[in-house]
Amino acid sequence: MAERTSEELLIAVGRGDEGAFEELVRRYQLQLINFFFPLVWDRHTAEDLAQEVFVRLYTSAAGYQPTAPFTSYLFRIARNCWIDQHRQTKSRRLERSIEAADEATGASLGDVLSMLIEQPEETARKEEFVKGLVGAIDNLPTEHKVVFILSQVEGLRYKQIGDILEIPEGTVKSRMHAALKKIREDLQSQARKSKNP
């Protein structure tokens, strides 16, 4: 089972192979939770959204045509699930905390992102930096946030992100550049405020 590609597994699911579906869940459940968590900042909501992706994956398996990489197909479903959830809850602000981020991602979110963005010298403690980073990500416009998470958390290439979001690769690059610039500015602003309260 492990040597079969994800595309082959989903085709098998469409033919009624429950074991193939279990293998897809095993391969992608944590990846989906880590995708959703920085979008909703709530572990249980991220888990629920991941489950919804698998429900949609299962129900659409019979009609699946492997015309794009499986992960593009999977994250397109994930994006649509998040958009549906976001529309339902946009008026309700979710509580966030560093503890929740640690619980959901094993603190890997801050570790990964802090390597990608130059940490301001004024930010003395890592915990404060991660807290500021969480806030900076949360303040990104939705279209920039999704590109940032797919690139920096999920490690997808710009072309694949463009396929998932159905936008040109150049637009992905532009949104990523804008996201990094905004995060950097937010972190530097926070560092100045903490230095000069």
Image (tube, rainbow, N blue to C red):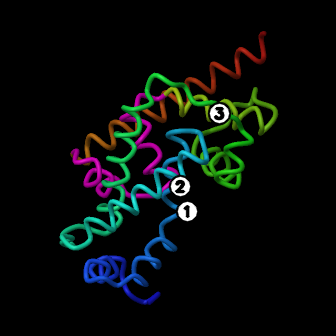
Picture residue at 35% right of the left edge, 39% below the top: 83
Task: State yes or no: discs 1 and 2 in contact (Cβ < 8 Å).
Answer: yes
Quadrant including the C terminus: top right
- Labels 3 and 1: the sequence-earlier one: 1
Residue at 26% in and 48% down: 169
Residue type at mark 1?
A: Leu
| Disc 1 to disc 2, C-alpha distance | 5 Å
Measuring from the top left, give residue 100's x and y in whole percent. Answer: 69, 43
Instruction: Look at the numbered disc 3 and give the secondary structure of its residue.
Output: loop
The residue that label 1 is drawn on is 30
| Marks 2 and 3, the one that precedes in the sequence | 2
Residue lying at 70% horizontally and 22% vertically, measured from the top left: 191
Task: Work out which residue is located at the far right of the displayed protein and give it.
Answer: 125
To which quarter of the image does residue 173 belong? Answer: top left
In terms of secondary structure, where does tag 1 sit? helix
Q: Is residue 158 magenta?
A: yes
**Main secondary structure found in the magenta portion:** helix
Q: How many other residues sit within 10 Å of disc 1, few (<14), some (14-19) or many (≥20)? A: some
User: Which residue position holds label 3?
Assistant: 96
User: Could you tell me the amino acid type at mark 2?
Assistant: Ile
44 left or right of 175?
A: right
Q: Is residue 148 left or right of residue 108?
A: left
- Residue 160, compared with residue 1, is above or below; it is above
Q: Amino acid at mark 3?
A: Arg
Task: Residue 183: give x, y in percent of width and height.
Answer: 54, 30
Residue depicted at x 59% and y 40%: 117
Q: CA distance from mark 2 to mark 3?
A: 16 Å
Q: How packed is label 2: few (under 14 Cα within 10 Å), some, or many (20 or more)? A: many
Provide the residue span drawn in magenta.
Answer: 140-167
How far apart marks 3 and 1 lie (CA) works out to 20 Å
**Residue projecting furthest to the top:** 197
List the residue tagged with mark 2. Answer: 33
